[in-house]
Amino acid sequence: MNESIKLKSVYKYFELAEGQKLTVLNDINFTVSAGDSLAIIGPSGSGKTTLLGLCAGLDAPSEGEIFINGRDITRLNEDERAMIRNRELGFVFQNFQLLPTLSALDNVKIPLEIRGNAPNAAKLACELLEKVGLKERMQHFPSQLSGGEQQRVAIARAFIGEPAILFADEPTGNLDEETAGVITDLLFGLHKEMGTTLIMVTHNNELALKTGRRLTLMGGKIVEDIYHQ
Ligand SMILES: Nc1ncnc2c1ncn2[C@@H]1O[C@H](COP(=O)(O)OP(=O)(O)O)[C@@H](O)[C@H]1O
Ligand SMILES: [Mg+2]
């Protein structure tokens, strides 16, 4: 099986004051095969969001290597990493992160428009919005949508570029239980249908159990790595 993402001896420090170093991630090593799913759990402050940000190339580690589809992204410059984010990765955040001045449709089109030369962007965005159940809401702005609807738009935006890996940071964290269930089903449905590798941070046990593997962080270290099914 192809390696989708691989972390080798990854550390993240923050410099607090002169000579004072806070270690947020401590010797992280794991590999996820293409098409697999992984849940990252752990108490607040254990480093989950920091880890996901490094995996997605949003930030650089202090030490170590991160391979996305075989390429070490820690050796790339910011422009090259941005290109990989746009072409190979998708991200769903806890607080949706839609652009407030754009309609649902225009939000979903963004990743393809960044790639340039995207004549099919509108058509693909419509298809995806229909798939997530928002056919009647395409021209709505984020402020005119419920939290669950905004997250569905964010999921459509994350999948439109057919990413190799989709990262989700507590995607149901701001939603009620019923809406969380809908979002969970959508995420896993698209992950299976498109063969996307899925890596998510969650406090939701039901969500974690749907993945093939659960990794527990504590104080910046992996303390448990369990495969289910
Ligand atoms: N830019 C930063 N500077 C200093 N400390 C940070 C910074 N970002 C995160 N941290 C610290 O790193 C730790 C892990 O944070 P985070 O990854 O957000 O945890 P989690 O998502 O598991 O709640 C926390 O103690 C947090 O305060
Ligand atoms: Mg977090």
Image (tube, rainbow, N blue to C red):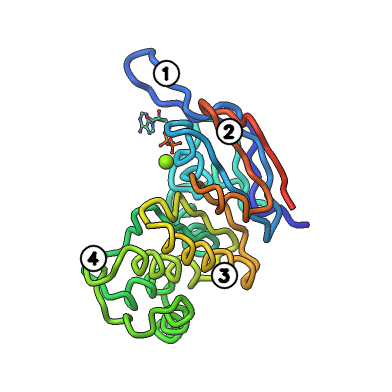
Q: Quadrant of the N terminus?
A: bottom right
Distance CA(mark 4)–CA(mark 3): 25 Å
**Is disc 2 surrounded by few (<14), some (14 to 19) or many (20+) residues within 10 Å?**
many
Q: Earlier in the sequence, mark 4 or mark 3?
A: 4
Which residue in the structure is indicated by mark 1? 21
**Which is in the foreground here, disc 3 or disc 2?**
3
Work out whether residue 165 or residue 227 is closer to the camera in this orientation and state it.
Answer: 227
Residue 10 shows which numbered tag? 2
The first of marks 3 and 2 along the sequence is 2
Vertical arrangement, residue 77 with respect to residue 221, above or below: below
Given this view, does label 3 or label 1 mark the residue nearer the observer?
3
- Looking at the rendered image, the disc whose residue lies closer to the viewer, 4 or 3, is 3
Q: Residue at coordinates 50% horizontally, 69% vertically from top-left? A: 159
- The residue at which mark 3 appears reads as 190
- C-alpha gap between disc 3 and disc 2: 29 Å
Asked whether the beta carbons under mark 3 and mark 2 sit within 8 Å of each other, the answer is no
First in sequence: mark 2 vs mark 1: 2
| Among the 4 quarters of the image, the one containing residue 6 | top right
Q: Nearer the viewer, residue 138 or 69?
A: 138
Q: Residue 117: tell me if it is visible.
A: no
Residue shown at 35%/69% (left/top)? 149
Residue 118 visible (yes or no): yes
- Please state which of the two labelled residues, at mark 1 or mark 4, is closer to the viewer: 4
**How far separated are the C-alphas under marks 2 and 1?**
16 Å
